[in-house]
Amino acid sequence: MELQCENAHLACSSCCSKLKSKCSCCGYNYNRCRGLENVIESIDKISCKYAKYGCKETKPYNEKTEHEKDCRRAICFCPHPSSCSFAGPYENLYLHFGIKHAADITRFTYNTTFSLCVDINQEHIFLQEQSGSVILILSHQLKKQGRVFYIDCVGTRALKNHIVYRLTAKSMETSRTLKCVPNIYTKWSKHNEPRKNHLTVPPDFAGYDGTLSLSICITEGVEALSWILFGDD
């Protein structure tokens, strides 16, 4: 949305909100400027800023920014803790991670439950889907109430609500389960505080050596969307 004050000073909606709808030049309130919006909409379509990485989309000026937030060719950064400097489109990151950091990956298949034994000193475990779809990070933190687990995803915003994960920890008498949608990051970094949605596992769930076993199932596509919309198991 484009705006102007009574003295015809212009501002975009983003700047207007930062200025609390008051013109920084004269102090008058901003109002919507439909004439300028019509001019902008008439501008020929513009290439996405990720065109050099393979995006072939062209959008009108007023739609370009929103497209780039969801663009599948957006730049993603390697999350490996070795300070790896790789950055590129998601597909390239997936290939890079699977080759360069293969020794640090646990591979999995969608809709298949697998087990992980997490040592008390392991802070992160990298998960890579077999068919070339996704990189996930299982985070593990020690808290007063127990051990905390959650999963993040490295990728573009196009993956939002396309993946659901289930974490389960069991003891002799009971179990704890979390079913959740991962947060999506193009540039992931270690977080000191757990996500709002996380699995807390009491200390007595672990073995004598501190190792704790988790069952994990990761779902994507139609099955994941069904759970998000309807809560299906």
Image (cartoon, helix red, strand yellow):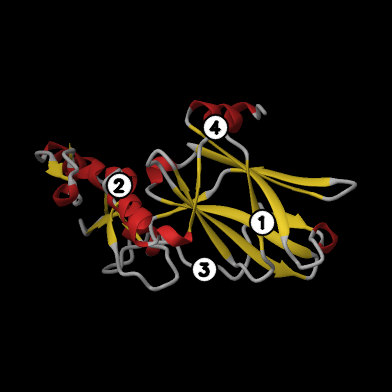
Callout 1–callout 4 Cβ contact below 8 Å: no
Mark 1 lies on residue: 117
Q: What's the CA distance linking mark 1 and mark 4?
A: 25 Å
Where does the C terminus fall, quadrant-wise?
A: top right
Q: What's the CA distance linking mark 1 and mark 2?
A: 29 Å
Does 96 appear above or below 178? below
Give the mark nearer the N terminus: 1 vs 4. Answer: 1
x then y, percent, for residue 50: 20, 50
- Give the residue type that dot 2 points to: Glu
Q: Is residue 84 left or right of residue 64?
A: right
Mark 3 lies on residue: 190
Query: What crowding class fits label 4: few (fewer than 14 Cα within 10 Å), some (14-19), or many (20 or more)?
Result: many
Callout 1–callout 2 Cβ contact below 8 Å: no
- Give the residue type that dot 1 points to: Cys
State the residue lying farthest toward the left: 44
Query: What crowding class fits label 2: few (fewer than 14 Cα within 10 Å), some (14-19), or many (20 or more)?
Result: some
Point out which mark residue 224 bears.
4
Give the mark nearer the N terminus: 2 vs 3. Answer: 2
Does 66 appear above or below 154? above
Q: What's the CA distance linking mark 3 and mark 1?
A: 21 Å
Mark 2 lies on residue: 91
Between label 3 and label 1, give the one nearer the viewer. 1
Give the mark nearer the N terminus: 3 vs 1. Answer: 1
Does 219 appear above or below 69? above
Between label 1 and label 4, give the one nearer the viewer. 1
Callout 3–callout 1 Cβ contact below 8 Å: no
State the residue lying farthest toward the right: 173
